[in-house]
Amino acid sequence: EADIYQTPRYLVIGTGKKITLECSQTMGHDKMYWYQQDPGMELHLIHYSYGVNSTEKGDLSSESTVSRIRTEHFPLTLESARPSHTSQYLCASSTLDTEAFFGQGTRLTVV
Amino acid sequence: ILNVEQSPQSLHVQEGDSTNFTCSFPSSNFYALHWYRWETAKSPEALFVMTLNGDEKKKGRISATLNTKEGYSYLYIKGSQPEDSATYLCLYSSASKIIFGSGTRLSIRP
């Protein structure tokens, strides 16, 4: 059973608020990823990390930031949420280039 | 709570063999079912988007079927090759929700 968790599953928040989406995995994976999906659009990589203190931007530009202070945590932060940030965010982790474990996703709505 | 289940979670197949795996999803309020192929640090590759009950899509050696009434989709790979090794992710969407499966990790043995 996959041991990767995202919280919250659903979040409705007002414009201008700071929010952090949590992603945790208990498998000891070095590699972690954040993806974003807008309704009717494809899934896009926004951030990834290959280990502690390593973070990179993905192929879709995002105003969010990430941190990787511990192997098991890869939180995503929006300093000031806007309605354009309304989307679905998916976290994943892997140890091999062809195997990934996905979280259940966080649906963010900014009003 | 609505869930999308993929099975098996992991699969090891001999090169040249054909294989298939399943995505189960809620049959209510169905809008679309997506299949993605995931490999390394890039955006997942979109394989298929299916919306109609009975849909069958094909892309090379990979094909997929959809049954919205019973809530399942099969992904088939014919004559597996080492480059098919990847995680395959399905995604269910209704008018108001997107729910991801946890992926099937496929490994092809040469």
Image (cartoon, coloured by chain):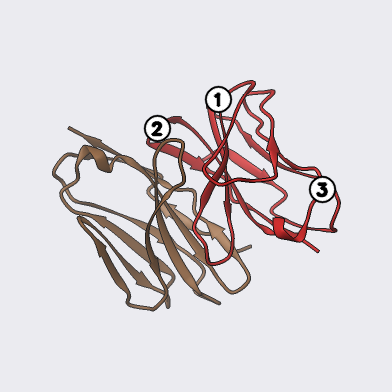
Chain colours: A red, B brown
Determine if residue B3 is in view: no
**Disc number at residue A97?**
2
Q: Quadrant of the N terminus of chain B?
A: bottom right
Q: Nearer the viewer, residue B55 or B21?
A: B55
N-terminal of the two: label 1 or label 2?
1
**In the image, which disc is placed on residue A80?**
3
Left or right placement of residue A59 versus residue A107 in this view: left
A51 vs A64: above or below: above
Position of the C terminus of chain B by quadrant? top left
Q: Nearer the viewer, mark 1 or mark 2?
A: 2
Label 2 environment density (alpha carbons within 10 Å; few <14, some 14–19, many ≥20) = some
Decide: marks 1, 2 in contact (CB < 8 A)?
Answer: no
The subunit letter for the residue under badge 1 reads A
Amino acid type of disc 3? Answer: Ser
- x and y percentages locating residue A50 in the rendered image: 53, 25
Determine if residue A47 is in view.
yes
Counting other residues with Cα less than 10 Å from the Cα at mark 3, is it few (<14), some (14-19), or many (20 or more)?
some
Relative vertical location of residue B95 with respect to residue B110 in this rendering, above or below: below
Label number found at residue A28 = 1
In this view, the residue farthest toward the top is A52
Residue type of the residue flagged with mark 1: Gly
**Dot 1, how many residues are within 10 Å of its Cα: few (below 14), some (14-19), or many (20+)?**
few
Task: Name the residue nearer the viewer: B26 or A110.
Answer: A110
Can marks 1 and 2 be said to lie on one chain? yes
Mark nearer the viewer, 3 or 1: 3
* Amino acid type of the residue tagged 2 in the rendering: Asp
| Residue B95 position by quadrant | bottom right
